[in-house]
């Protein structure tokens, strides 16, 4: 998961007010947090809660590199092609963390060629204090959440969950809006002398059906122009394979339905090929003998005895709905926006600290 949070140009930002709002998304990163301010930017704050996926040691954020000390990067996400991009463009990485590539793309290719080069799931915010710029981008389908608070007079906030921004609006005298940052788009802002911001560009860099700007994980010429089934097989399998990129153990959410069972099977296949030194664990969510639990149990029994099965919800949260509601993205339940199973896992991961160390793959979002 990970939580990103940034605020620019708010008029009366007491430190306790800043911390209180930043604290609203603590559950997104149980391992470390950091809040940063640099006097070069008046009233500019960047905060990060970390759940490390790649490079536990050096991947902390806001990421700053000694070659480019004027750049501050926040990113919730995984960038699957960071090594490929590094080789193609000759980038010298300081860390082993996937998101570092965003800084190099910005420096070498410019702000208009960062977001469209990324093969991954991401929401990021890059602050450039030398050129007084902010670049914000989100993945094509909005797999990673991002909310944006904007006032008519240039105050700007971004956060992985809207609850990290909602209370800030109480201090805004001018007209404001708080909405999801549009998937498949990026925005560039100028940071004015008083710390407020001015929108310079807003670009929808991706429409469904567009070809990728980066070299695709499965090259286009490896796809058949006639055999759609074969293409689906190849692409789905590759999609699971590239998600093995993590220093943590990989697991999967399993409902026992067609989609998740397929993903689990592909995951086990790729895990074997990659010689992962542990057995894949699966997580099913449901109460008692709910249909998902029955289907998942059946699936595991018939197919993959070696998968590990745990009824997360029943074991930890039976009858305690109020304990997990705060972990939804939105301040209140919004049908079709939040995904209950992912939220349960979030809470579970934040709660069970001592023995679990996993990345969970599911069929719609992964983390
Ligand atoms: N959870 C995240 O968003 C992880 C961010 C980054 N990929 C890391 O490994 O640290």
Image (spheres, helix red, strand yellow):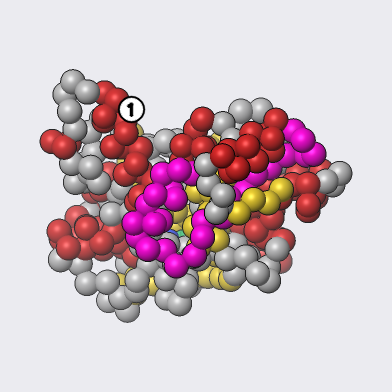
Task: Give 359 or 167, whichever is nearer the viewer.
Answer: 359
267 inside magenta stretch: yes
- Name the residue located 22 percent from the left edge and 58 percent from the top edge: 84
The residue furthest right is: 319
Asked whether, in this view, residue 80 is left or right of residue 144, the answer is left
Q: Secondary structure at mark 1?
A: loop
Residue 296's image quarter?
Answer: top right
- Name the residue located 49 percent from the left edge and 33 percent from the top edge: 259
Task: Give 86 or 349, whichever is nearer the viewer.
Answer: 349
- Name the residue located 55 percent from the left edge and 54 percent from the top edge: 306
Residue 110's image quarter?
Answer: bottom left
Q: Residues within 10 Å of mark 1 (few under 14, many from 20)?
A: few
Task: Give 151 or 112, whichever is nearer the viewer.
Answer: 112
In the picture of the structure, the residue carrying the numbered disc 1 is 208
Under 8 Å from ligand 1: the CB of mark 1? no
Residue 95's place in the image compared with 141, above or below, is below
Asked whether residue 220 is in view, the answer is yes
Q: Position of residue 204 (x, y in %)?
A: 33, 34
Asked whether, in this view, residue 128 is left or right of residue 159, the answer is left
| Quadrant showing the N terminus | bottom right
Q: How many marks?
A: 1
- Name the residue located 22 percent from the left edge and 57 percent from the top edge: 85
35 inside magenta stretch: no
Asked whether residue 338 is in view, the answer is no
Looking at the rendering, the stretch of residues picked out in magenta corresponds to 264-290
Residue 73's image quarter?
Answer: bottom left
Residue 243's place in the image compared with 16, above or below, is above
Q: Position of residue 367 (x, y in %)?
A: 51, 52
Q: Position of residue 185 (x, y in %)?
A: 37, 38
Q: Position of residue 180 (x, y in %)?
A: 53, 37
């Amino acid at each position: 998961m990970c939580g990103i949070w940034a605020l620019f140009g708010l008029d009366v930002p007491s430190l306790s007010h800043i911390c209180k709002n930043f604290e609203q998304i603590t559950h997104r990163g149980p391992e470390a947090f950091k809040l940063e301010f640099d006097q070069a930017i008046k009233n500019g704050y960047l905060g990060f809660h970390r759940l490390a996926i790649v490079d536990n040691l050096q991947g902390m954020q806001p990421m700053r590199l000694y070659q480019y000390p004027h750049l501050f990067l926040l990113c919730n996400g995984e960038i699957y092609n960071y090594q490929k991009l590094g080789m193609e463009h000759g980038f010298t990485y300081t860390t082993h963390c996937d998101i570092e590539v965003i800084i190099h793309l910005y420096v070498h290719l410019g702000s208009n060629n960062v977001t469209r080069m990324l093969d991954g799931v991401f929401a990021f915010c890059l602050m450039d204090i030398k050129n007084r710029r902010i670049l914000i981008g989100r993945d094509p389908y909005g797999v990673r959440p991002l909310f944006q608070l904007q006032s008519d007079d240039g105050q700007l906030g971004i956060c992985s969950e809207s609850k990290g921004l909602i209370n800030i609006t109480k201090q805004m005298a001018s007209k404001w809006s708080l909405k999801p940052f549009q998937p498949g788009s990026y925005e560039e802002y100028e940071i004015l002398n008083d710390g407020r911001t001015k929108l310079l560009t807003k670009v929808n860099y991706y429409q469904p059906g567009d070809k990728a700007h980066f070299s695709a994980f499965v090259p286009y010429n490896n796809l058949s122009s006639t055999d759609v089934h074969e293409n689906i097989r190849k692409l789905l399998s590759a999609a699971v394979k590239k998600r093995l990129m993590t220093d943590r153990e990989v697991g999967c959410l399993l409902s026992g339905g067609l989609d998740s069972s397929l993903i689990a099977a592909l995951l086990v296949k790729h895990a074997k090929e990659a010689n992962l030194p542990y057995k894949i664990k699966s997580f099913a969510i449901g109460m008692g003998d709910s249909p998902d639990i029955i289907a998942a149990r059946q699936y595991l029994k018939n197919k993959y005895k070696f998968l590990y099965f745990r009824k997360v919800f029943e074991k930890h949260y039976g009858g305690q709905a109020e304990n997990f509601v705060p972990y939804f993205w939105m301040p209140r339940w919004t049908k079709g926006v939040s995904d209950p199973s992912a939220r349960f896992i979030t809470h579970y991961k934040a709660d069970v600290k001592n023995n679990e160390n996993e990345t969970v793959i599911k069929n719609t979002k992964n983390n």
